[in-house]
Amino acid sequence: MTLTTTDLHNFLQTRRSIRRFKPDPVSDSVIQNILSTATYAPSAHNRQPWRFVVITSFAVKIQLADAMAEDFERDLLRDGMAPEKVQSQIKRSKERIASAPLAILLCLDMTEMDSYPDEKRQQAERMMAIQSVAAAGLQLLLAAHAEGLGGVWVCSPLFAQETIQKVLDLSESWEPQGMFFIGYPDELPKNKELRDLQGLVKML
Ligand SMILES: Cc1cc2nc3c(=O)[nH]c(=O)nc-3n(C[C@H](O)[C@H](O)[C@H](O)COP(=O)(O)O)c2cc1C
């Protein structure tokens, strides 16, 4: 099959966040393809500071969901949310992890990035590493799309970093950044409104 430029743009433009999945598992070879393609992302100094934790075990997903829910509950109650509303949000978030055939946790590892004595450059270096990890995240979603899978990026790990490190027995240098729920789509996402390109671009 020869892909045209239009086909490739169409492929990129048709990736959507999918949050409901069929129960069918994702095979190991497909998981490897997705991870491998994610690692082709560009990275600052080519240091490739992304790390991945692949979770297919239902027991591990539940353990993780329960632990993250404790942090989530504490934060929402502290925000002043009504306890019943907190419980329904927690239930929803646990169900989302449990019902995804595949969860991939995306982590940042700063150990091979450069170090600077001053805060300003150190912050810039960290930002570069985070941007690199995000590039791998997008590449991962696109690779899943190429495999006919759907996926969604969720940010909840950012709010439960230490808890996740503990539950999954991760090295301290693996800093959770985001998680991807992936599986064969069981929904058709609604049309998405895109901002007008003209307002987003300055042509010089
Ligand atoms: C950094 C990041 C964090 C996100 N976090 C969440 C999340 O916590 N929960 C969720 O349902 N979707 C999350 N999303 C998905 C966005 O809601 C989604 O990409 C956006 O609405 C555009 O829709 P599309 O992906 O279908 O194009 C996240 C996306 C990104 C890039």
Image: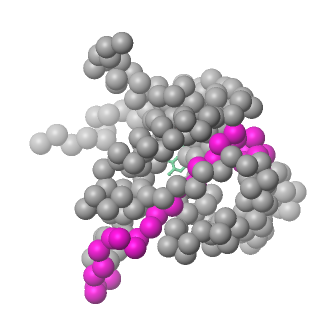
Position in image of residue 163 (x %, y %): 68, 70
| Snapshot quadrant of residue 128 | bottom left
| In this rendering, position of residue 186 left or right of residue 172 | right
Q: Residue at x 51, y 41 (%)?
A: 32
Please state the total of marks drawn on the protein image: 0
- Which residue occupies the extreme bottom position in the image? 117
Tell which of 182 and 195 is nearer to you: 182
Residue stretch in magenta: 94-119
Q: For the C terminus, which image quadrant?
A: top left
Tell me if residue 155 can be seen: no
Does 53 sit above or below residue 24? Answer: below
Q: Residue at x 31, y 14 (%)?
A: 2
Does 7 sit above or below residue 98? Answer: above
Is residue 98 part of the magenta span, yes or no? yes
| In this rendering, position of residue 83 left or right of residue 15 | right
| Snapshot quadrant of residue 171 | bottom right
- Which residue occupies the extreme top position in the image? 1
Q: For the N terminus, which image quadrant?
A: top left
